[in-house]
């Protein structure tokens, strides 16, 4: 089980990224638009830099929904390999058969 603080920190980052997503996209569009004057693009870059760092999508870490484990993560199932094996062994995931030899 991951530390509760790390799980909460990641959830906070997800909320911030969702909150500032439209503002970030608007500023990035202005910055990347070569038709706009350089001064406007520079001001947009400054405003983008003023936004919180944790509002960036790249700061989000994929974590298991069951345990909070950051590694061995299956995106399709949103859980780690260990949680997947345990739930599969218990028969809680339909269609999953754990092989053992």
Image (cartoon, rainbow, N blue to C red):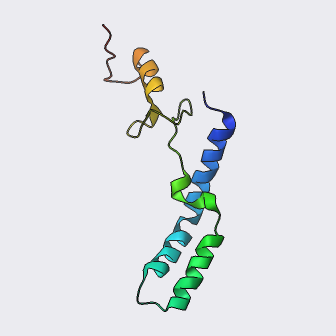
Query: Could you tell me residue 1's position as x and y percent?
Result: 60, 27
Query: Could you tell me residue 39's position as x and y percent?
Result: 55, 90
Foreground residue among 15 and 3: 3
Toward which corner of the image does residue 67 lie, by quadrant? Answer: top right
The residue drawn where x is 61% and y is 46% is 11
In the image, 2: left or right of 97?
right
Query: Could you tell me residue 52's position as x and y percent?
Result: 65, 63
The residue drawn where x is 41% and y is 15% is 89
Q: In which quadrant is the C terminus drawn?
A: top left
The residue drawn where x is 50% and y is 43% is 62
Q: Is residue 39 above or below residue 10?
A: below
Toward which corner of the image does residue 55 lie, by quadrant? Answer: bottom right
The residue drawn where x is 61% and y is 78% is 46
Q: Is residue 81 above or below residue 58?
A: above
Q: Is residue 51 above or below residue 88?
A: below
Residue farthest toward the top in the current orientation of the protein: 101
Q: Is residue 5 above or below residue 50?
A: above
In the image, 2: left or right of 78?
right
Total marks shown come to 0
């Amino acid at each position: 089980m991951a530390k509760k603080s790390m799980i909460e920190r990641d959830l906070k980052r997800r909320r911030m990224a969702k909150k500032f997503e439209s503002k970030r996209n608007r500023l990035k569009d202005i910055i990347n638009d070569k038709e706009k004057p350089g001064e406007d693009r520079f001001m947009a870059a400054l405003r983008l830099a003023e936004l919180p760092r944790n509002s960036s999508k790249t700061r989000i870490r994929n974590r298991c929904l069951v345990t909070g484990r950051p590694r061995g993560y299956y995106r399709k199932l949103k859980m780690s390999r260990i949680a997947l094996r345990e739930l599969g062994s218990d028969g809680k995931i339909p269609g999953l058969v754990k092989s053992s030899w």
